[in-house]
Amino acid sequence: MKNLIILLLVIGGFFYFTSDSFDFSGIEKSINNFLGNNEKNPYSSDKLVSARQLPGDARLAAKIRYEWAEMLNSNKKVIFYTYTNDVQSQNFHRGIQNQLSKLGSSYKLVAYEHSYYKGIMYGEIKSKSCSSPAECNQMRKESSAISNLTILLDNCAKTMCIINNKNNSYLRLRKKDLNDANATLTKYRNW
């Protein structure tokens, strides 16, 4: 039992320290195949993006974490990413803003400076105890919803996502590249 705990701590530490630079796409693909989530995707041949369904409980999480409500209830396609103060990241941010000014009003930009994003994403999490089985079940659902939303937004923050609330799906750039992002925004403008 002690060895199992140590193994889990080592694995958890590995993912914690490598999460910003480690590409989880192969692991994600394996998990999706294992879970049977490998249905044919019309965007799977696109080398720039991967397409996914929004988590079913994303809107529940947005009700709890109001910071994300506007993004997950927008009638426009939402572009979400984070940026830092380094030159490449600032160029990406300005380039996206420039591209959006050319494309018109079909997109809504939600971009945060990375440290600000971490503050609102992981900021104040209130915990309370439940007094009935129904209340405990509701709290579990809410916690699960927030966890799923956190995973989604953390993955999107690393590159860029276009969230389409009308069809309950999103496209995630495979790498954070301004040329790829601009091409994707133009290509999927009417998606």
Image: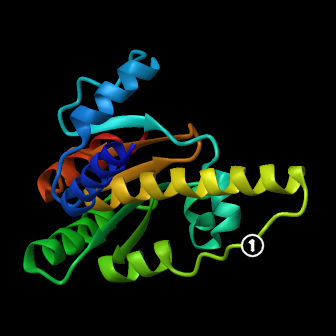
How many numbered tags mark residues here? 1
Mark 1 crowd level (few <14, some 14–19, many ≥20, 10 Å Cα): few
Quarter that holds the C terminus:
top left
What is the x, y in percent for residue 162?
A: 39, 50
Residue at the limit of the structure toward the front, as seen here: 2
Give the answer, above or below, for where 6 lies relative to 62.
above
Q: Position of residue 96 (x, y in %)?
A: 25, 65
Q: What residue type is labelled 1?
A: Lys
**Is residue 178 toward the left or the right of residue 37 in the image?**
left
Q: Can residue 37 be seen in this view?
A: no
Viewer-proximal residue among 58 and 20: 20
Rendered image quadrant of residue 25: top left
Whether residue 153 appears in this view of the structure is yes
Residue 91 or residue 114, whichever sits in front: 114
Decide if residue 88 is on the left or right side of residue 52: left
Q: In this view, does 82 lie above or below 54?
A: below
* Lateral position of residue 145 relative to residue 122, left or right: right
Q: Is 155 above or below relative to 67?
A: above
Residue 64 located left or right of residue 25: right
- Write the residue at 27% across / 60% down: 16
In the picture shown, does residue 102 fall above or below 190?
below
Of the 4 image quadrants, the one containing the N terminus is top left
Residue that mark 1 sits on: 128
Q: What element carries label 1?
A: loop
Query: Residue 81, position in %: x, y?
Result: 33, 64
**Where does the image place residue 83, in percent across and percent down from the top left?**
25, 73
